[in-house]
Image: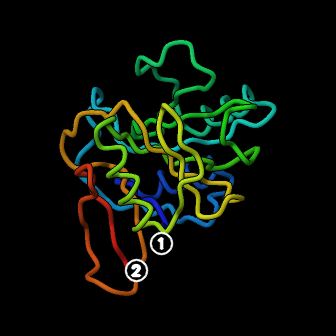
Amino acid sequence: MLTGIVIDALDVARMERFWLDAVKGRTGGLELRFVPTAKPKPPSHKNRLHLDLAGGPDWEAEVERLVALGARRIDIGQGDVPWDVLADPEGNEFCVLRPGHPGVLADSGLVAICLDVGENDRHAQSAFWRSRADWHAVEHHDWGIRLRHKPSSTVSLVMGPPAAPKAGRNRLRLEVTQREGEPGEFLDAGGNEFHVTH
C-alpha cells in the first residue's frame, strides 16, 4: 500500500513546517516524511517526482500564501500552462493547480503525486505501481496514467512524460507499507528509488 512520500531535507524542521502549512494538513492520509541530507538540490536538476497542490477558487491568493511561507516562483520551461510552478524552500518543484484542472477532487491540499515516466516505460511503471501501491488505474490518457486508491480518493498518482534524466538519487521518493519482504530502499521499474516499511 502506498502510504507516504519521503523527502530529503537539509533543514528537516523547516521543511516539515513548510509542507505541513502548504498542504493545510490535507494529504489524503499519506505521510510526508523528511530525512536529513547534507547534499543540496542542484539548481539545474529537475526532480523526477513532484507534488501538486489544489489552488482552489482563489488560486492566486493561494500562490501568494505559499510564497509567503517560503516558496518561490520558478520557470522550468513550462510555458503558458493552467497551473503555477513553484519551488519549496530547498528548491523542490511543485505545482499549484487552478480550478477546473482535470482529475482534481479537492479545493486545497495535496491532490497529485507526479512521477516522470518515459513513453516506453509507461506500461511497466503502471503495472509496477498498481501492484506495489495497491492503487488502481482510473484514467488512461495520451499524457499518461492516473492511479487512485479508490475512485473517490482526493490524491492521485500521475505517471507520464517527460522523464527527467536520472542524475543521482531522487530527493523525493514514494513509500509503501507491506507486511512481507524486507524493508529498505529499492528501485521501481524506471530506476527510481522507493522505500518499503512494515
For label 2, the crowd category at 10 Å Cα-Cα, with few meaning under 14, some 14 to 19 and many 20 or more, is some
State the residue at coordinates (45%, 42%): 50
What x and y, as percent, mark residue 27?
62, 58
Q: Which mark is residue 53?
A: none
Q: Determine whether label 1 and label 2 are within 8 Å by CB.
A: yes
Secondary structure beneath dot 2 equals loop
Residue found at x 53% / y 65%? 31
Structure colour scheme: rainbow
The residue wearing badge 1 is: 1
Where residue 166 sits in the image (x, y, percent)?
21, 40
* Residue placed furthest toward the bottom: 180
Residue 30 quadrant: bottom right
Residue 116 vs 173, above or below: the answer is: above
Give me the residue at 36% from left, 44% from top.
122
Circle 1 Cα neighbour tier, 10 Å, few/some/many (<14 / 14–19 / ≥20):
some
Give the camera-side residue of 102 and 75. Answer: 102
- Residue assigned mark 2: 178
Q: Secondary structure at mark 1?
A: loop
* Residue 100 horizontal side relative to residue 72, left or right: right
Q: Nearer the viewer, residue 168 or 138?
A: 138
